[in-house]
Amino acid sequence: MTASPATTPTAALPSLETVASCIAGYDPNALTVSQAQDFIARFVPAVGAVEMLALRSALGRVLARDVVSPIAVPASDNSAMDGYALASAELRDDAPTVLRVAGTAYAGQQFEGQAAAGECVRIMTGAVMPSGLDTVVPQEFVADAPEEAGANGAAAALPAGATAQSRRIAIPAGVVAPGDNRRLAGEDLALGEAALSAGRVLRPADIGLLASLGQAEVPVRRRLRVAFFSTGDELRSIGEPLDAGCVYDSNRYTLHAMLTRLGVEVLDFGVVRDEPAALEAAFRSACENADAVITSGGVSVGEADHTRKVMATLGEVAFWRIAMRPGRPMAFGRVSSNARSAVLFGLPGNPVAVMVTFYAFVREALLAMAGAAPQAMPMLRARAAAAIRKKPGRTEYQRGIVARAADGDWDVQLTGAQGSGILRSMSMANGLVVLHHGQGSVAEGERVDVLPFDGLV
């Protein structure tokens, strides 16, 4: 199914000026991380198009509508394990309970018999509970009782020639309580109960839940399209000769990987030379084919950078200096071409700064554009293995390695040099140490917030 990347008429979208008026203390030259996050959240639109997907194709997609359970799950009371179903009124507290086995209940088959007083039913996992029985004793707790044993008789082997229906079992006192090991009808989902809410990014358990409701298809938001490219005459793509003063472009590969983890449709526009005509052509093509455009490099103030000028020409763009490290320069706004517009994220050029700004700002914005419900990334509290120097007045993202200490607590140590061009510091790390705006230096042993990479990077 193909749908236009345009989501909302441009005239209906808020302007940068309108959003800026809603941000207390807004100053594009001294913006805090939280102010920038608030600004972006107010500005970005969500895709509106909905498509029906086969259930097996829906993993990672955003649910477009609430799902209400059309059935009760499970449909009937059933056994949670293999054992013997009985009426809890039969259980004795002072001696073993001895009962006759009236038959066997199998999963997927209705038990046709009726257990009388003093009887139980052999039952398999998932089998519907026979009428009048409310408790299941696991088979490992049960022993055979001889035919002649009374209610207090000791357990013994089944007499030779005895049939299943003549079996008597002994249940030790206290091994089960009334209602044990019985799944109640509708205890997972009741008929008409909300199963999943719109905006949920579907996970494996959600796919299974929908299958339990018999849903072959699921309504999801159209996949978000994100175009990205790198800017700079010094960049070379893999496979090209590396001339003096040039570097291989790593940002495209980290961006591609991060976007792939989000489940968006990725459009790689490659490396664009820092020339006005080439940049304008790239931006126009990206706008016409994507919902969002991400660039790396060219957003700081520099004589040779034409990216800022082209951005400003094609739309409304704010150029920010954010109180953070790494990642201070950033551009954000909207660029347009041929009546189509796309949200713009102009990220710094340094490799670590690209990743940090992506996780600090872009990731949540793209999820919101895809229609996903807001969900903050979880933070881990860990002890600093060594002192960390920091001045209040900016948010710092240090690369760290979190590990279990001997006392079972979490410790984090930095990966070494923290320069924004040292991509190895991200590769070595398993989390970002987040030192907040008003926070000062950290003493050894003091607790800090860590954003784990598991499931993120």
Image (cartoon, rainbow, N blue to C red):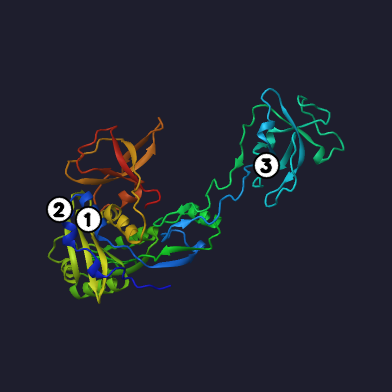
Question: Which corner quadrant holds the N terminus?
Answer: bottom left
User: Does dot 3 land on a helix, a strand or a loop?
Assistant: loop
Amino acid found under the numbered disc labelled 1: Phe
Callout 2–callout 1 Cβ contact below 8 Å: yes
Label disc, if present, on residue 293 of the rendered structure: none
Q: Position of residue 78 (x, y in %)?
A: 63, 45
Measured in 3D between alpha carbons, the distance from the residue under mark 1 to the one under mark 3, in whole angstroms, is 57 Å
- Residue at 20% in and 76% down: 277
Q: SS class of the residue under badge 2?
A: loop
175 or 413, which lies in front? 175
Q: Earlier in the sequence, mark 1 or mark 3?
A: 1
Spatial separation of the CA atoms under disc 2 and disc 1: 9 Å
Q: Residue at x 24, y 33 (%)?
A: 443
Report how many numbered discs are placed on residues in the image: 3
Percent x, y of residue 125: 65, 45
Q: Whole-Å distance between the Cαs marked 3 and 2?
A: 65 Å
In this orientation, which residue lies closer to the viewer: 140 or 412? 140
Residue underneath mark 1:
39
Measured as percent of width and height from the top left, residue 9 is found at 27, 70
Question: Relative to residue 111, is residue 385 drawn left or right?
Answer: left
Instruction: Judge whether residue 444 can be spotted in this image.
Output: yes
Label of residue 82 in the image: 3
The amino acid sitting under disc 3 is: Asp
**Image height of 141 relative to 72, above or below:** above
Q: Which residue is located at x 17 percent, y 60 percent?
A: 18
Front position in the image: 128 or 38: 128
Residue 306's quadrant in the figure? bottom left
Residue 415, horizontal then vertical, whole percent = 31, 44
Residue labelled with disc 2: 26
Precedes in sequence: disc 2 or disc 1? 2
* Residue at the top extreme of this rendering: 94
